[in-house]
Amino acid sequence: MLLQKMTWQEIDSLDRSTVVVATFGAMEQHGTHLPLETDALIGQEIARRLDNACDQRLLVLPTQWLGLSLHHMSFSGTITTSVDTYLAMAFEILGSIAQTGFRKILVINSHGGNVSALDLALTKCRETYPKTRIVGVTYWNAAAAQLRALRESSIGGMGHACELETSLVLATSPKLVRSDRLGPDGRQAVSEFAGKDMLQGGSITISRHFSEISCNGAVGDPRTASAEKGERFFEAIISRLATLVSEIESGRIDEFSQIGE
């Protein structure tokens, strides 16, 4: 169910245990071959496919295309908020749903730069709306094991405008991919403490501008990307997220077992 297509009376009649899906993307440069809407486009498609996989019983909010993209501002076209504005925006979007009485919200993030700010926004929501269970997930983390099994690029090949994102856009909107411009780009950290790509994170965090680690705005190798692989990536992601929805619906997400037993 798409919130923007419904009337307020139709929303008002919904069971307040309905899982609400809020996707957060970005509007930022994606190298030489992908459009600026890549993260928002992927987030929107994930939400659409997830709702279909769940028999359209989810209440899906419009994808938030404005993200925290300060680290991409050296590349033209990027639109970003400040940190404080992003925190306020995310908190108020989720708060608008919580105030309506919905008790279960799944936040799906499709942009790495949003992660830390969304964590803070969800923490604030927990304190302000204690009766609302809000679960946050970055889509590639939910299906990391499955994506590793499907990838063809070596470590470093999945980062930004990479094998994963390029395949997903090819499966969704192939005309938006400038296939004649595909090529590896970016630099990988040497330190053993630093992350190597989106599926192999590190133990430290350093805020860097993309101009420090990329020539043309990408990090990774999209040459092995394909629409067919994008469909397989989507299947893996949706399968894992559908399982997560089931756990939120059933309450299993808040069940615990005693350690040591």
Image: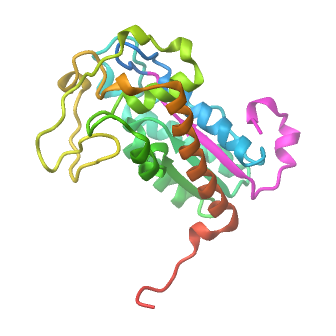
Using the rendered image of the protein, determine whether residue 260 is visible from the camera's viewpoint. yes
Quadrant location, the C terminus? bottom left
Residue 76 image position (x, y, % from top left): 35, 11
239 lies above or below 185: below
Residue 257 horizontal side relative to residue 208, left or right: right
Residue 10 image position (x, y, % from top left): 87, 41
Residue 242 horizontal side relative to residue 17, left or right: left
Q: Nearer the viewer, residue 104 or 139?
A: 139
- The image quadrant of residue 79 is top left
Asked if the stretch drawn in magenta spans residue 5, the answer is yes
| Residue extending farthest top | 180
- The image quadrant of residue 195 is top left
- The image quadrant of residue 34 is top left
Asked if the stretch drawn in magenta spans residue 78, the answer is no
Q: Residue at x 34, y 41 (%)?
A: 198
Residue 122 image position (x, y, % from top left): 49, 52
Q: Nearer the viewer, residue 157 or 32?
A: 157
Q: Nearer the viewer, residue 108 or 67?
A: 108
Q: Please, which colouring scheme is shown?
A: rainbow
Q: Residue at x 26, y 40 (%)?
A: 155
Q: Residue at x 77, y 44 (%)?
A: 56
Residue 186 image position (x, y, % from top left): 23, 25
Using the rendered image of the protein, determine whether residue 65 is visible from the camera's viewpoint. no
| Residue extending farthest bottom | 261
Numbered-mark total? 0
Q: Which residues are magenta?
A: 1-27
Q: Residue at x 18, y 25 (%)?
A: 212
68 lies above or below 200: above
Residue 159 horizontal side relative to residue 42, left or right: left
Quadrant location, the N terminus? top right
183 lies above or below 249: above
